[in-house]
Image (spheres, helix red, strand yellow):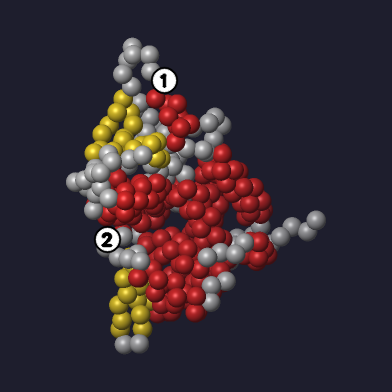
Amino acid sequence: MKQLTCTEWITDALARESLRSKSLVMTVMGDAIAPHGGAAWLGSLIELLAPLGVTDRLVRTSVFRLVQEGWLTASREGRRSRYAFDPQSLPRFQRANRRIYAPPGLHWDGRWTLVLAPNGSIDADLRTAVRKELEWEGFAMLGPGVLAHPGADPEGLLDALGRTGARDKVFVVSAAELPDVGSRPLQELVGEGWDLTAVARSYVDFIAQFTPLLALLREAPPVAPADAFAIRSLLIHAYRRLQLHDPMLPIELLPDPWPGSDAYAVAREVYRMVAVPAEVHIDAVLRREDAEAPSADEAFYGRFGGLRG
């Protein structure tokens, strides 16, 4: 069987799956634009997204919706439009980036964070909003008005409660197991709150999709900058979706072996092989619209444990 080239792998990957344009714009903004000052002209976004199958019209529609939803802000200079992260949404982008590029390995201190909203304390609309926001942060609903996580990010929790207007309307407690009272071990709550089967299966599918690409990159000549950018974007688009559906439980509470660790290793190696040549393409595209567009910041080179060397 003939081995695919990198360009053919990209074409095949795009043909296998219908990718949502708005989600792809978010991926490119977070992975490619954030390190370059966090803002880009519409023309640059259109050029970057075109090889990923996103048309001019779909880019325009996507950024318009992202502005409406509060993710991006728009500004104009003559006939040109420039898009940047909304200051209020930026912390959420930054936390998502930490989840994507940082190695797995949160350890459990034996405690759970509980968010309690007793009956009548908040109305139904606010209760729904809090549940949705906290589920995005990895929380599970253990019962009516009870959301829990064994390794909650305090910054994310504070932001979610502030964004919904529930900060002073719910109870937030840290709970540990009482010794010598004959209760079930607290780690068994994981089985009550999360079914990790689908998450594990998604990690296995990711490994199956990108491991052949990793072998190809190791054997093929250096990948062209435009192809490197396309591969990097498709990789992070797929991996980002996995991360955002993973509740990020401490490793002591996960099945052993956990495929998330192997998926991270594959993502890290592919990213490290294409990240720097992709930057050549990103710089060229951004500077066609803005000759002063900055190069990637130093934080970019810390992704996946370090991209230099």
In the rendered image, residue 261, in percent from the top left (x then y), is placed at 52, 39
Tell me the quarter of the picture where residue 74 sits. Answer: bottom left
What residue is drawn where x is 30% and y is 77%?
75
Tell me the quarter of the picture where residue 294 sits. Answer: bottom left
Seen from this angle, which residue lies furthest bottom? 78
- Judging by the rendered image, the residue that carries numbered circle 1 is 184
Q: Is residue 279 visible?
A: no
Q: Nearer the viewer, residue 108 or 279?
A: 108
Q: Nearer the viewer, residue 223 or 89?
A: 89
4 left or right of 126?
Answer: right
Quarter of the picture holding the N terminus: bottom right
Q: Is residue 123 visible?
A: yes
Seen from this angle, which residue lies furthest front? 120
Seen from this angle, which residue lies furthest right? 1
What residue is drawn where x is 31% and y is 81%?
76
In the rendered image, residue 101, in percent from the top left (x then y), is placed at 43, 49
Q: Closer to the observer: label 1 or label 2?
A: 1
> Please, is residue 292 above or below residue 249 in the view?
below
What residue is drawn where x is 55% and y is 52%?
270
How much space separates mark 1 and mark 2, taking CA atoms? 41 Å
Instruction: Name which of mark 1 and mark 2 comes first in the sequence.
Output: 2
- Dot 2 crowding, Cα within 10 Å, few <14, some 14–19, many 20+: few
In the rendered image, residue 47, in percent from the top left (x then y), is placed at 49, 76
48 left or right of 4?
Answer: left
- Judging by the rendered image, the residue that carries numbered circle 2 is 88
The residue type indicated by label 2 comes to: Gln
- Dot 1 crowding, Cα within 10 Å, few <14, some 14–19, many 20+: few
The residue type indicated by label 1 comes to: Arg
Q: Nearer the viewer, residue 35 or 306?
A: 35
Seen from this angle, which residue lies furthest left? 168
